[in-house]
Each structure stands twice: as C-alpha cells, then as structure tokens.
Image (cartoon, helix red, strand yellow):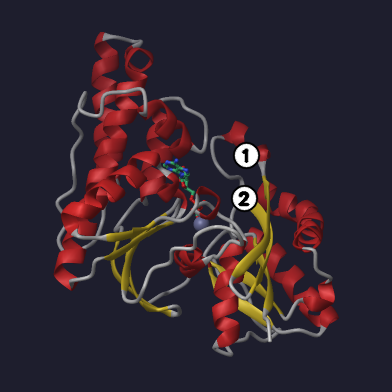
Amino acid sequence: MSITILGIESSCDDTSAAIIRDGYMLSNIIANQEVHRIYGGVVPELASRAHQQNIIPVVDQAIKVAGISKNEIDAIAFTRGPGLMGSLLVGSSFAKGLSLSLGIPLIEINHLQAHILANFILEIGSTNHVPSFPFLCLLVSGGHSQLVLMNDYLEMKIIGQTIDDAAGEAFDKCAKIMGLPYPGGPVIDKLASEGNPDAFKFSKPRIENFDYSFSGLKTSFLYFLRDQIKNDPSFIDHNKNDLCASLQKTIIDILLDKLMKASVNLKINEIALAGGVSANSGLRYKVTSQASQMNWKTYIPAFKFTTDNAAMIAITGYYKYKAGLFASQDVVPTARINQG
Ligand code: KG4
Ligand code: ZN
C-alpha cells in the first residue's frame, strides 16, 4: 500500500508545502518572503504574518501540482523546530487543524534532521543516488553547522558543532560588512566565482575535536577591512570579488578540515552535505574534488533541496510514518531542539 505525506515547513522565512508518495516527490511549493530584504535580515513578526498569508495557497497548490485529492493524504508532517516561534506556530497550527478535519495523523519534524534526510528525496525520472548507512553529514545552514553521524534514517548523533556562529551566519554577516544584500551567502558565492581565492588570508580557528567556530573569522574580516579602508576608502569596491573568493575559501577550508578528520577518525567514507550553505558552488566543488583523494562517495542534494523546503519535511515524515512515530494534538512548536 502506498504512503502519501503532506509536508509543511514554516521555520523561518519560507512558506513551503510538499507531497511525497513512497519516497518520491510529487510537488514542492515554496513561497519566499521578499519583505525582509530591505531590513538586511529576517524580521520575525513580518515572517509570521507572511506565513499566515501564504500557508493556504501554498498547501492548496502542493496538492494540485501533485495531482492528488486531499483525501489521499495519509499523514501531515510539519516542522516543530528549531526556528522562529511565530513562524513555527503558523505551520504547526495549520497542520493540526488540517489533521483534525481530515482525520489523519500528525508527525512532528526536527528541521535539522529533515535537512539531512533531503538526501533521500527521490524524483521520478531522475537517477536517484542516496547514501548508505552509516554516513557522515556536514549540515551547514543559517543557524547551524554540525557534523552528524547517521546510523539510520532516524538515528543521528552529532559529533561536532559550532561553538558560536554558523557557517551561513559567517557568510551573511561578512556580506553585511561589505554592504552586500541579505542573504549574503548566494551573493558571495556569485562574486567569488570572479575573484582570486588566494588574494587575502583570514584567520582560522584552532578548536579541539570536531567542533567549529566562525565568530573569530568574522571579527578578523571586519578589522582587516577597517585597516584597509583607512588607506583606500574604496577598498571594498576595488576588491569585492577577491574578498568574496578569499572569504569563501577560508570558510570552506574550515568546514572541510573537520569533515576530513572525522571521516578518517570514524573510518566512514560515505559523505553527505545538507543545509542552505551546501548550495555553495565552491563547497560542492571542493567536496567532490576531495572525493578521490579521500576515497569518499559523496552525496549532495539538488539545489532546490538544500535551502528550506517542505519536501525534506515530507520525506522525514515518510520515514517516521513507517516507524509509527506520530504526534498528538498537544504538540507545541519549539524554537530550540536538543538533538542526539
Ligand atoms: O538551510 P537554510 O535555508 O535555512 C536555515 O535553516 O538556516 O540556510 C540559509 C543559509 C543562509 O545563511 C544563506 O546565506 C546560506 O544558507 N546560503 C548560502 C548559499 N545559498 C544559501 N551560503 C553560501 N553559498 C550559497 N550559494
Ligand atoms: Zn533550514
């Protein structure tokens, strides 16, 4: 018997709904919120208001595009956290209401686990290449940077994580320092492709074990620019591409260093990427090019599954459904989630 899951994602500034049937994506609708751009970051109150406007049309479209009727949905998976409380409340309240009206179960989803399981989304008509267990996942998003050991679909163990800023925050904050628009990651990625990654050197953290730190890099970037601007007020404009390329290279080196150490230490050569920063072309290239030297098999989600999307929520819901893990109507969203 086939299993059809509706996934709903509303943890930050994207409202998304998707249908997954037996692991295959039938639809994945995302409404981005442009309203935050002029503020240089996500404004929580505006985000929850936009979710309220978007949620019904987005879910409706996901069902239509999938070519199913709502009565064919077996369960509703929604993001419980981590994320912005006001945003999470919109998705979770909607999911609860719809589950009651359709008389189908609810499944609560950890947004970070979902980013990792995005590697298992199957698409009709494409070659589906998925990791085997155990595998190591470098999960890099706007709020998290973690090295996660996946022993099974629902068995995750965090073996390293950032002690301060996330990799995505490093991209976004350094972009802001250069006067680039939010979110800075994709903008830096684009400008970096035209620059010299060895033009400037920035400090790298010395942290024990498999943990990360990015706040020192942000500070060294800020002080470096302050000094240079004293001599040349147009320093940023004159060197934008080289600054982006050098900064991006430093972030990638920091990420790869711990990933390689963890792979050697745990003797795992199945390596996956996940999260918004895994859309970065430099990171994707570096991980792929490192593969033969490290004897890795690498798995990198399609671009559309790296940043926030509901297909990743629905695929996680699919595996939780098969494991019989359902939520009650009392479930409440949570801004933080303690994992592994
Ligand atoms: O996973 P995500 O969509 O949301 C969170 O759960 O945080 O990640 C968003 C982060 C932002 O910091 C954004 O700048 C970064 O992913 N990002 C990128 C790229 N695309 C998105 N960073 C570097 N290069 C990119 N191409
Ligand atoms: Zn995310």
- Residue 143 % position (x, y): 44, 54
> Residue, x 64% and y 70% (percent of image)?
78
> Residue, x 29% and y 9% (percent of image)?
232
Element class at badge 2: loop
Label 1 CB-ligand 1 distance < 8 A = no
Snapshot quadrant of residue 144: bottom left
Quadrant occupied by the N terminus:
bottom right
Answer with left or right where residue 205 lies relative to residue 50. left
> Residue, x 69% and y 47% (percent of image)?
46
Label 2 CB-ligand 1 distance < 8 A = no
Counting the numbered discs, the total is 2
Residue 200 lies, with reference to residue 75, above or below; the image says above
Disc 1 from disc 2: Cα separation: 8 Å
Q: Amino acid at mark 2?
A: Asp
Residue 271 lies, with reference to residue 38, above or below; the image says below
> Residue, x 32% and y 17% (percent of image)?
239
* Contact check, label 1 and label 2, Cβ < 8 Å: yes
Closer to the camera in the image, 321 or 237: 321
Q: Which residue is mark 1?
A: 36
Q: Amino acid at mark 1?
A: His
Mark 1 surroundings: few (<14), some (14-19) or many (≥20) residues within 10 A: some
Quadrant occupied by the C terminus:
bottom left
Residue 223 lies, with reference to residue 206, above or below; the image says above
- Residue 124 % position (x, y): 61, 62
Snapshot quadrant of residue 196: top left
Disc 1 or 2, which lies upstream in sequence? 2
Q: Which residue is mark 2?
A: 13
Q: Which mark is residue 189?
A: none
